[in-house]
Image (cartoon, rainbow, N blue to C red):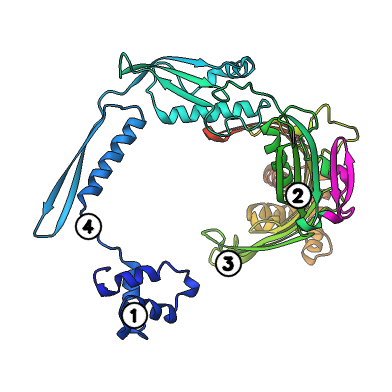
Amino acid sequence: MYNVANPKYDTMLAEYMTYPREIRNRELRDSLLIKYGMPEDVGKNLFIDRFLHTIGQPPVILDQSKTESSADVIRKRLVYRGYWDADVKFKHNLDSAAKKATVDYLVKHRDPTIISEYYYDIPDPKVKEIYESQYQKSHILAGDILDQTKLEEEVRRITQQMRDNGYYKFNSSNEEIYFTADTLLSRKNVPLVMDVRKDSLGTPYKKATIGDIKVHVLEKLSDTVDTVKDSLRGITFYKLDDQYKTRALWRPIILETGKVYDQRNFDLTKRNISSMNNFNIIDYKEGLRKGSDSIIDVSYYLAPLAKYDFRIAGDLTYSQILNVGLAPSVDLTSRNVFGGAENLTVGLSGIVGSVKSSKNLDRRVLAYEASLQGNLSFPRLLLPFSYWKLIPKRYSPTSNINLGVSVQDNIGMGRLNFNTGLNYFANVNDIVTHKLSIFNTQLSLTRNKDKYYDFFPNDRLYRDKMFEYYSPTLWQQFQSGSIESDEVSSIIMQDTGFQQALTGEGLDLFNNFRQSLINKDRQTQDVLISSLIYNYIYNEIGKKIRLILSISTGK
């Protein structure tokens, strides 16, 4: 396709396509045509050439220097992965008639270089102690292939470990951890030494502590001068107004003044702020205090999100049962309902479609379900006592209250469902989460219970025969609508004299009738379920393992 285009335009069109789409027009093409010495083509649309040039791919011309370079790249990659004596050769296969060529690469990896012994040299005793506390997590072991990727993983692991234990910006220059392999005696089995030191002078490491913690709540950074200062438990807050309570702003901040620096707390604080769904972090500053090498000052600049968030969605579904179904939904979220970063979400959703009628399979009838759900979330636990010592802030405890109602009309009897619950969440870390659901209650009411007999014709037959057999008068009243089915059934079941006098076919009819009432009660009964549920969730993302242990009680 590329070759079909006029080759004289290749260079001009190649530059033309480098410009942003919004400025690609005739004026730009004309200027490029003049630039490349084609004034006779000024004003031409060149649509076909542009189209072919865009969708086509230029042919790859055989270039021996690129083949050699590729072979060298392959060899270097093998060396990088521990195959130091790897050799890569190549051969060109030319087809002069077709003007085509192929390249074959012959890769000889040979035996890899093995780590015969592994040592580490860490002059700083405190850093050494921290490293040894998690030595079993090392990515490097004697007997392994000397793979540079493993060395890089180990550098990242140690760097994170030290930053989690107070050493601010440990190895920020990427020159504090390095490896030395001794190849004097052998290239196949080499001892490896890891050195950890701050610089060539052996300057000792020093743990950093948290200094000033400031939180600015504003619309834009220029609003800083108009904010009012407040403070709570060592954290300073600057607010434009009292839209958010100071305590609500304090809860997501895991950092504490005077505590040893821990990178995990910095990451967790940012995550907590984002999960509140109330703020954008428009700026964030952290750094060593001027004149100090161990005190870190931190500032967060937060912009409140819009008060309301409105979302509309819809799905179109098809199945053999529902045929074509439409499922619209509308959600409205109101943020900061009570001034403590609480969010209220109200959602209205439903699905409507047609299903085959249970009475006549050749007909389709309308089926639908509509639900109204409300969720009120709190960035704290709803408890009547202070729980910070029992469940610290680093666990990011939250709560939510659910309340909903749904109505369903399907091929069977319709149902009216109510649900409510109070849920508590606590994240021990990025892997373990606890969830406790109390007052988790569901009430399901059956609508139009008399429709039971429309879907169970045999039970209706037993009922009609029993009514007529028991009392033709009541049977006539039932048929005229002056008495309900359940009333007649109750009269029969309470007439013990009638029951004791039954024999033969009458007794068989009564037994079938009684069984039909049991079936009807089971199918149409209203259900109340109340449960207490505890979930332990283990989610180790790196290994893609998810284990959920759930313990519940209900009735």
Question: Residue 392 magenta-drawn?
Answer: no
Q: What distance separates the C-alpha of mark 3 from that of mark 4?
A: 65 Å
Secondary structure of the residue carrying tag 4 is loop
Q: How many marks?
A: 4
Provide residue 314's location: percent of width, then percent of height: 62, 63
Measure how far apart labels 4 and 1 are at the Cα level: 26 Å
Depth check, front residue: 161 or 274: 161
Q: Earlier in the sequence, mark 3 or mark 2?
A: 2
> Going by the image, does 367 lie left or right of 45?
right
Mark 1 or mark 2: whose residue is earlier in sequence: 1
Residue 416 falls in which quadrant of the image? Answer: bottom right
In this rendering, does residue 413 appear at all? Answer: yes
Q: Dot 3: few (<14), some (14–19), or many (≥20) neighbours within 10 Å?
A: some
Residue position marked by numbered label 2 in the rendering: 301
Q: Earlier in the sequence, mark 1 or mark 3?
A: 1
Tell me the amino acid under the disc marked 3: Arg
What amino acid is at disc 2? Tyr
